[in-house]
Image (spheres, rainbow, N blue to C red):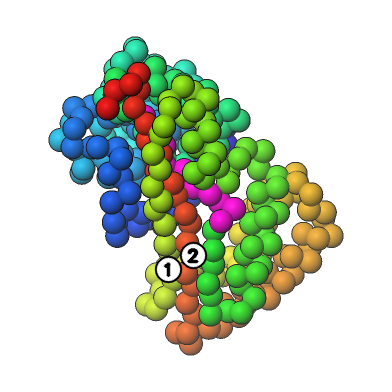
């Protein structure tokens, strides 16, 4: 399974569900006394679940450094998503967010979810191949797409899982007729710029952010020469971002589509 830092998870999930939680309706959170958040990471989803239900929310993750952050929000347990440390039928609802995309066999995890769930299983998974970027810097959207495609080619798991892939995993796990709702996580950069926004712009100008993904990109079809060309154009784009930001003119909007898939266990409804 791919590993992530606490800073990465906090950054990519910041503001998620703040605008609307309507897509979480299939989880039926007002019905349950107990909810398990699998692969909870730093507990961003766990905190949302705890706000939406009167029941107990428990987070489970294999990374102790992430659990140290998550346990400030909800009770936590160390465990593997495909070998959950709970008895059968331990929780009313078992849910995950952006977990299945990082697993080589998503259906195996969903089967384990169904084992420990009494009533309902759900997964909130993105389609990282359908991410869109709008920017006041003309070159940024096309370069972001090139970098994303190169990265996706070397990841090794299906990070474009989205709705169709998640439904397939549910059906392979024996959960029939799951429902799916879409939620777009929109991240906007505009004046006044945060310290994080300024740091991100500087990393574009130096190419450091792109360099972090170099091993993954080269694991796919991208050659070193193609990477060098991309990094050169990326740095030029980054310098324009910094320049526009200095003038208060830079704006960026990124949309990541997530799909909330939910289904009943053993015919429960």
Residue 4 pos. (x, y %): 52, 42
Report which residue position mark 1 lands on. 188
Q: Dot 2, how many residues are within 10 Å of its Cα: few (below 14), some (14-19), or many (20+)?
A: some
Q: Horizontal and vertical percent for residue 70? A: 34, 38
Pick the front one: 262 or 74 = 262
Residue 205 appears in view: no
Residue at figure coordinates x 49%, y 72% from the top left? 252
The question of residue 124 being in magenta is answered with yes
- Up/down of 157 relative to 128, above or below: above
What residue is rendered at 60% in x and 30% in y?
104
> Which region shows up in magenta?
121-130
Q: Considering the image in quadrants, where does the N terminus appear?
A: top right
Query: Mark 2 highlights which residue?
Result: 254
Question: What is the residue that sits farthest to the bottom in this orientation?
Answer: 247
The secondary element bearing badge 2 is classed as: strand
Residue at (53% x, 72% y) in the render: 134
* Residue 168 against residue 267 in the figure, above or below: below
Q: Quadrant of the C terminus?
A: top left
Which residue occupies the extreme top position in the image?
Answer: 87
**How many labels, in total?**
2
| Residue 251 screen position, x and y as percent | 47, 77
Asked if disc 2 and disc 1 are in contact, CB closer than 8 Å, the reply is yes
Q: Main secondary structure of the magenta part?
A: strand
Circle 1: is it few (<14), some (14-19), or many (20+) Cα within 10 Å?
some
Residue 192: say if magenta: no
- What's the CA distance linking mark 2 and mark 1? 6 Å
Residue 172 visible in the current orientation: yes
Sequence-wise, which precedes: disc 2 or disc 1?
Answer: 1
As rendered, which of 151 and 42 lies closer to the eye?
A: 151
* Residue 164, numbered circle: none
């Amino acid at each position: 399974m791919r590993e992530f830092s606490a800073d990465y998870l906090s950054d990519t999930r910041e503001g998620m569900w703040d605008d609307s939680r309507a897509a979480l309706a299939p989880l039926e959170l007002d019905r349950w006394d107990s909810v398990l958040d699998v692969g909870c990471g730093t507990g961003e989803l766990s905190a949302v679940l705890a706000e939406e239900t009167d029941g107990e929310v428990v987070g489970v993750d294999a990374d102790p450094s992430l659990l140290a952050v998550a346990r400030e929000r909800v009770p936590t347990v160390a465990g593997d998503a495909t070998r959950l440390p709970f008895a059968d039928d331990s929780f009313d609802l078992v849910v995950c967010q952006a977990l299945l995309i990082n697993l080589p066999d998503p259906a195996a995890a969903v089967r384990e979810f169904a084992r420990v769930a009494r009533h309902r299983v759900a997964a909130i998974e993105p389609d990282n191949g359908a991410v869109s970027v709008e920017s006041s810097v003309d070159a940024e959207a096309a370069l972001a797409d090139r970098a994303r495609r190169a990265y996706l080619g070397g990841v090794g798991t299906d990070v474009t899982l989205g709705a169709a892939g998640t439904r397939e995993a549910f059906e392979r796990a024996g959960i029939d007729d799951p429902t799916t709702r879409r939620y777009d996580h929109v991240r906007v950069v505009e004046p006044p710029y945060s310290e994080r926004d300024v740091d991100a712009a500087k990393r574009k100008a130096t190419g450091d952010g792109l360099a972090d993904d170099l091993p993954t990109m080269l694991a796919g079809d991208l050659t070193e020469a193609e990477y060098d060309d991309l990094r050169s154009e990326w740095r030029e784009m980054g310098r324009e971002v910094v320049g526009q930001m200095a003038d208060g003119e830079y704006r960026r909007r990124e949309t990541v589509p997530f799909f909330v898939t939910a289904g009943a266990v053993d015919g429960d409804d």
